Image: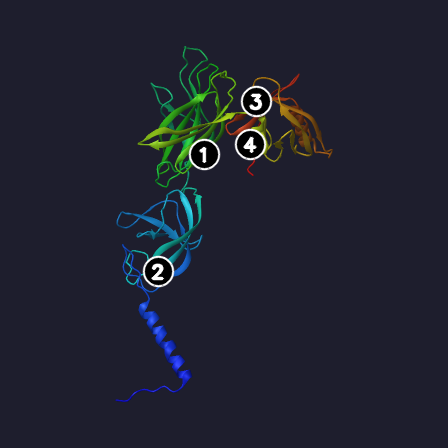
Amino acid sequence: MHRLQITSPRLLIILLAMLSAAIAVSCTPVIQSPTSPLAIVGPEERTLYVGPQWAECADGQQCLQIKYTPDSEWESLAHGIAGFDYEPGYDYELRVNQYPLANPAADGAPFRYDLLTIVSKTVAEESGPALPMSALENTTYTGIYTDTTVTLSAGVYEGAPFVAGGAARPRVTLVQPTAMGDLNDDGARDAAVLLAENSGGSGVFTYLAVVLNQAQTPQNVGTVLIGDRTQIRALTIRSGQIHLSIITQGPDDPFCCPSRKVHLAFALQEGQVVEVNRIDEGRVGLADLYGTSWQLSKLDTNEPIPADVEITLAIDARKVAGFSGCNQYSGAVSAGNGALPQLINIQTLVSTKMACVSEVGNLERAYLTRLANVTQWRYLGGNLALTYQGSDLFGTLVFTPVAK
């Protein structure tokens, strides 16, 4: 037998390095997923995007939707992501360890993933088309009258007169705003709509109706009364719940003049529309308008302004300002004197003096005259309504909100 003798220190170092590498390879762990075939050597760290709804796998089970870049196509992942607690309704960006599988299933992903960190989790906009407004405006609704359903035609229902030949009759109108979002966790964009009912008296009763999106066919599954002469601040759908912000009557308020800010949340539970939360946010006041921006849509409720004319209003503590179609303007603002919470004074309006074309100039003067005579404000279907009253003027400026 010959004994190998190594006399060169350099050769000895090379042989020891080769031996260490071989030992490292032989000791690399094989990663096994509880629900997947054996994985081979890994991992590779990468970004993974997870969609907001479950997908259906070939075997009828629920799968995650994943993709590797924001613009790539969704793929189904049957065996999940280790350490990841998934909640539908959110878009996720994850950092994960990716392990190639030695024997992936023919219809499955070739990798196994372990969660490292959640980079972002944001409320998702549901996929698929929303119900068109034309469908909602011609749908049958229940829960308003006990003895009959209501089928809208172009957004309006009118019943027979209470007295033959009389003017008073039941009337229901679809009003704004409308919210879209998934309410029953099927991935479709359902709708929450507001209906105003009036039968000829002073009361105007607001109802919240839930409309499911059944393959682009609307189905009203529940309607609940919100209140009488209720002001609507905002209506949204978030995480499967309807959120409604309103101004409603407090214990001592007359029906004409609500003063309480209330936030309501509703959800579908066993096919019923259920109020799941109610928060009293205090008394409404002018300070609720501080920091808001608006764009004029109507000089009066039935007098829209031309679409190519821009008139704006920004409200802050003690000041209003904006663009009146041709010139910049500003003025002082304060709460009005009196017990009612939504009285307002706008005074000392000043503006720049640029020359305007006649049509825009006339509209600008009409707007600034009305603004200087504003006495009261309120929310109107998510918009801002300013009531003006002068010696020969009476009406309501209507503004739509400007997103920040």
Disc assigned to residue 99? 2
Q: In terms of secondary structure, where does tag 3 sit?
A: loop
Q: Could you say which is closer to the camera, residue 321 or residue 391?
A: 321
Residue underneath mark 1: 236
Left/right placement of residue 106 relative to residue 275 reads left
Location of residue 13 with respect to 389 vertically, above or below: below
- Give the residue at mark 3: 342
Q: Earlier in the sequence, mark 1 or mark 2?
A: 2
Please state which amino acid type lies under the numbered disc 3.
Gln
Q: Is residue 354 left or right of residue 291?
A: right
Classify 10 Å Cα crowding around label 2: few (below 14), some (14-19), many (20 and above). Answer: many
The answer to which of marks 3 and 4 sits earlier in the sequence is 3
Q: Secondary structure at mark 2?
A: strand
Q: CA distance from mark 3 to mark 1?
A: 24 Å
Q: Which residue is mark 4?
A: 400
Quadrant of the drawing holding the C terminus: top right
Instruction: Pinpoint residue 155: horizontal percent, then vertical percent.
Output: 44, 27
N-term-proximal mark, 2 vs 3: 2
